[in-house]
Image (cartoon, rainbow, N blue to C red):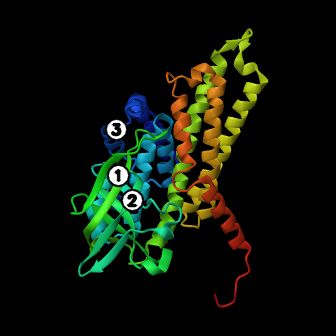
């Protein structure tokens, strides 16, 4: 990372402590999406870090973007989660596959935080099994008619633009998927108003979207018809790297609180950091965070170079998310009763960490992806195929 990039992250740390951190606990307690904070994050440049200047981006690269997400997650994982859903899962597909006209119309506002994006893939009957998508888009003249419903959608109730996964050729399975940019105000497109009451990430809005004969202009098709899966293959691994960054940020905050507590808390005449059982937990935290950081860095390097990253992204997400749950659990243990109290952020970090094992593909799905990539790499190639 260059000195300029290091300085950006240093400035980001100050910004996060000044703007994001102060209201994080209150937003979690009230289960309110902190829209003013979200827009401030956009103005700071977080959403545009990985996008070119043509669309209001900063062209700083994916490593800087992931570093910014990591910094935000230390203070408020909910805001980091909303940011990833917005910039990676919504803006990125538009950038990858949208027409030039669509990109110039939607991306500057999304990247600047003036508009909010959502990614609508999950349905009541399909999560990781995207071939089971029931939402359909039927071609009709100069537009598509979109019908269906999506659930557990981050930013659903605040979104101005939703990137929607729909079937355009239902009989073709995953090869019949297409992506559409559906905009607020299009007749038939609405959020139901339901807000999921969640264990963690409570300040990240999660809701439902419905589509009833929504007339979506053909220019809002992202990529080619039936070409949605190819864009998802680029978007989802990128989001998994960002989820790893969130998990690492959560873990770093928990570790820092533990080190401070181990130095300041005395029992039996000495700091608890001198007890070997506590030292073991601290050492495991540090080693795991360093290992997760290296996995993430490897994935970000592959992404910057345009190389396949499905396996590494799943490895990074799997390891970092399971690490975050373990570290936050042990952090509460180290703090004892104080850690269990809501006066400290540890119980929030613990609740937030759990979602990193579920969102953007569960740990079980990540293991399937990793194993599948291993098998494909060793399978003999059939001549002519």
Please provide percent x and percent y for residue 278. Answer: 73, 25
Residue 260 is drawn in which quadrant? top right
Residue 34 badge: 3
Q: Give the label, 1 or 3, closer to the camera.
A: 1
* Secondary element at image label 3: loop
Q: Is residue 30 above or below residue 324?
A: above
Residue for point 58% across, 48% down? 357
Q: Nearer the viewer, residue 2 or 19?
A: 19
Single out the residue that lies furthest toward the bottom: 384
Q: Which residue is mark 1?
A: 156
**Residues at marks 3 and 2 touching, judged by CB atoms closer than 8 Å:** no
State which tag comes first along the sequence, 1 or 3: 3
Real-space Cα separation, disc 2 to disc 1, in angstroms? 9 Å
Residue at 55%, 54% (x, y): give it. 241
Mark 3 vs 2, N-terminal side: 3
Residue pictured at 44% horizontal, 53% vertical: 60
Q: Name the front one of labels 3 and 2.
A: 2
The dot on residue 340 is: none
Can you give x and y, in whole percent of width and height, for residue 20 in the image? 40, 34
List the residue tagged with mark 2. Answer: 150
Q: Position of residue 298 (x, y in %)?
A: 62, 55
Q: Is residue 229 visible?
A: yes
Residue lying at the far top of the rendered structure: 269
Are the two marked residues, 2 and 1, in contact with CB atoms closer than 8 angstroms? yes
**How many other residues sit within 10 Å of disc 2, few (<14), some (14-19) or many (≥20)?**
many
Q: Is residue 59 visible?
A: no
In space, the residues marked 3 and 2 are separated at their CA atoms by 23 Å
Q: Is residue 114 left or right of residue 153?
A: left
Residue drawn 58% across the image and 54% down it: 362
């Amino acid at each position: 990372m260059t000195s300029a990039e290091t300085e950006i992250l240093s400035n980001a740390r100050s910004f996060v402590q000044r703007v994001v951190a102060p209201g994080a606990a209150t937003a979690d307690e009230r289960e309110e999406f902190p829209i003013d904070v979200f827009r401030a994050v956009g103005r700071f440049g977080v959403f545009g870090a990985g996008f070119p200047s043509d669309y209001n981006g900063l062209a700083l690269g994916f490593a800087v973007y992931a570093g910014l997400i990591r910094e935000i997650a230390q203070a408020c994982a909910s805001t980091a989660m909303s940011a990833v859903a917005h910039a990676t899962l919504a803006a990125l597909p538009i950038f990858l596959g949208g027409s030039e006209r669509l990109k110039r119309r939607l991306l500057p506002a999304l990247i600047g935080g003036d508009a909010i994006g959502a990614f609508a893939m999950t349905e009541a009957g399909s999560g990781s099994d995207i071939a089971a998508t029931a939402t359909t888009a039927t071609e009709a003249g100069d537009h598509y008619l979109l019908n269906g419903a999506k659930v557990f959608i981050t930013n659903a109730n605040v979104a101005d633009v939703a990137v929607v996964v729909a079937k355009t050729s239902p009989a073709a399975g995953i090869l019949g998927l297409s992506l559409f940019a559906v905009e607020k105000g299009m007749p038939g497109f609405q959020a139901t108003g339901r807000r999921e009451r969640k264990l963690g990430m409570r300040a990240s809005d999660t809701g439902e979207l419905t589509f009833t004969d929504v007339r979506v202009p053909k220019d809002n098709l992202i990529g080619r018809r039936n070409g949605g899966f190819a864009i998802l293959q680029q978007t989802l691994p990128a989001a998994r790297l960002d989820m790893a960054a969130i998990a690492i940020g959560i873990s770093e905050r928990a570790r820092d609180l533990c080190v401070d507590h181990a130095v300041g808390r005395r029992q039996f005449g000495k700091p608890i950091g001198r007890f070997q059982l506590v030292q073991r937990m601290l050492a495991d935290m540090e080693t795991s965070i360093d290992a997760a950081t290296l996995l993430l860095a490897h994935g970000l390097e592959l992404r910057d170079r345009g190389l396949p990253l499905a396996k590494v992204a799943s490895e990074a997400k799997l390891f970092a998310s399971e690490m975050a749950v373990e570290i936050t659990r042990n952090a509460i243990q180290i703090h004892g009763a104080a850690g269990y109290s809501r006066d400290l952020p540890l119980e929030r970090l613990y609740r937030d960490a759990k979602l990193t094992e579920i969102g953007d593909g569960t740990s079980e799905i990540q293991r399937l992806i990793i194993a599948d990539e291993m098998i494909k790499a060793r399978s003999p190639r059939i001549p002519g195929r």
